[in-house]
Amino acid sequence: MFRLSVRLAFFAASALGLQSSIAAADDTQTARGEYLVTIGGCNDCHTPGYFFGKPDSSRFLGGSDVGFELPGQGVFVGRNITPDKETGIGSWTREQIVAALQTGQRPDGRLLAPIMPWHAFAQLTEEDVTSIAVFLQSLKPVSHQVPGPFKPGEKVSTFMFRILPPGETAAAAPN
């Protein structure tokens, strides 16, 4: 009976140790993901206020308030990439986030906006892209519905940057 009690105690202690080592691994992966998101500049296009010089840290990565117009393609606003289930990527699995970063394709089959530099993220290791996904899933969900995307010629409801082909002037660009 004593040996059985000792074995059960050892098993319980081992399980607790395993849980804490898993938590430590997740913490390390989350920290790595935060680092990569920071140096990757994700905040720039995905946090409201960034392009006005006052990023709203309470809505970090909750979607921009400025779009990018690409000639012939429309206007694209940086999406909410927090784990909000209604307005962000909260319904995406970790694997779907990784796939979007590596292939440029969303879980619904739509391609990411052409301004999104997924080609650069596709060059990261599987471990690094997974760390980004882990970090994004660890964020506080932000409820913020981003407008768009807007097709060419559609009325835009947000500020936008206009990207012009070489040789064109802003005055000559169509409104």
Image (cartoon, rainbow, N blue to C red):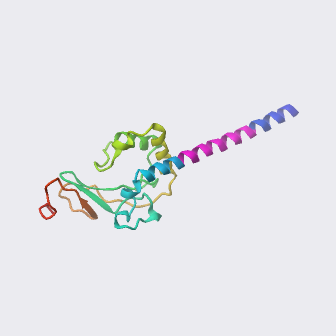
Q: Is residue 66 above or below residue 13?
A: below
Residue 24: in sight, yes or no?
Answer: yes
Q: Residue at x 30, y 44 (%)?
A: 111
State which region is magenta: 12-30
Q: Residue at x 41, y 50 (%)?
A: 40
Whether 9 is among the magenta residues is no
Q: Is residue 4 above or below residue 121?
A: above
> Residue 149: where, in percent of width, then height?
28, 55
Q: Quadrant of the N terminus?
A: top right
Q: Residue at x 43, y 46 (%)?
A: 92
Q: Quadrant of the C terminus?
A: bottom left
> Residue 10: where, in percent of width, then height?
78, 36
Instruction: Tell whether 111 sits left or right of 13.
Output: left
> Residue 99: where, in percent of width, then height?
40, 40
In which image quadrant can residue 78 be found?
A: bottom left
Look at the magenta stretch and give its main secondary structure: helix
Q: Nearer the viewer, residue 125 or 14?
A: 125
In which image quadrant can residue 120 be found?
A: top left
Instruction: Tell whether 110 sits left or right of 29.
Output: left
Q: Nearer the viewer, residue 153 or 56?
A: 56
Instruction: Tell whether 17 sits left or right of 70.
Output: right
Q: Nearer the viewer, residue 41 or 132?
A: 41
Q: Nearer the viewer, residue 85 or 23?
A: 23
